[in-house]
Image (spheres, helix red, strand yellow):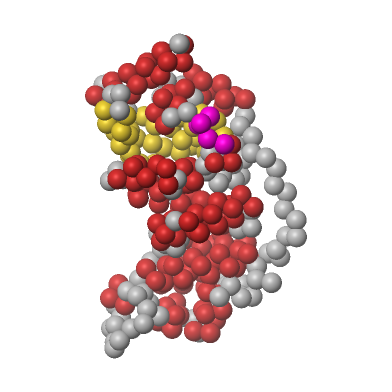
Amino acid sequence: MTHPHARELGSFLRARRNRLSPHDVGLEPGGRRKVTGLRREELALLAGLSTDYYQRMEQGREVRPSDDVLDALAGALALDDEERRHLFALARAARRPARAEVHRGPELVPESTRRLLRVMDTPAVVLGRHLDLLDWNPMAEALLGDPGDYPPDRLNMLLLMFDDTRTAERSCPDWERQALEYIGMMRTAVATDPTHPRATAIVGELSIRSAEFRRLWARHDVRESVSGTKTFRAAEVGDIDLHWDTYPLPGSPGPVMLVFTAEPGSADADRLRLLGTLHASRRQR
């Protein structure tokens, strides 16, 4: 049986090889090519490996590369620091025997974190390692809608992003960029536990019903902790441009807090404040 981390390592190497062209690494493309990226033998040559050895790595077969081999592959694939850490984490996990049983307890939000959420005057949510929505504050409810409208097993940022009933959101210019950020976070979670049932269920469902997800998932991008900007279209107050950042909570891997903030003194801050006030009024009624 193929080691799950070796299988994930092979998938990552294949995606990164397909990302490169011969021109990127100073090679002549030669005649007609059947592949869009580098051929296996070309990458093996760049990394100083035999083609057979590299092919077995991509196939997830019983290969346990040394750190020197990983260094050579990282250089040949032009990996950034985050991708390099991902490569080493997968390979080192693949060196260890696959565990027959893995303890997977429920993800809990510390009570102190719940209290912090309630006193924050900016939208914030707590996401589990597979992007399940574990908790949120009233400002997040004002901005994102009431999570109580969804069954608990559907409260997942990836499932919501690719929900066919919310396709209007995909017209936003930054939709794909944020989808890639969430997918990158899921990829990082999968690297720590490739056979986790929750990850398998989410990725399996989206792979079946969404061609967009399949395309983005195949890129094998990874994100450890992310930040960015997003435009929210709020009918009551107009568009709001917000910054968002993730903050890891205790645990390895553990939940993260996702916080949205507006530039102080900006029109976006005013609109966000007004949105929160309107939501609070509705709740009181």
**Residue in the foreground of this view, choosing between 87 and 148:** 148
Front-lying residue, 64 or 212: 212
Residue at 30% across / 24% down in the picture?
Answer: 236
User: Which residue is located at x 71 percent, y 65 percent?
Assistant: 97
Residue 111 position in % (x across, y down): 62, 25
Q: Main secondary structure of the magenta part?
A: helix
In this view, 82 is above or below 264: below
Name the spot of residue 113 as percent of width and height, x first: 57, 27
Query: Which range of residues does the magenta coloring cover?
Result: 147-151
What is the count of numbered marks? Answer: 0
Does residue 38 belong to the magenta stretch? no
Residue 269 visible, this orientation: no
Magenta stretch containing residue 150, yes or no? yes
Res 281 quadrant in image: top left
Please say if 86 is above or below 235.
below
Residue 244 at least partly seen: yes
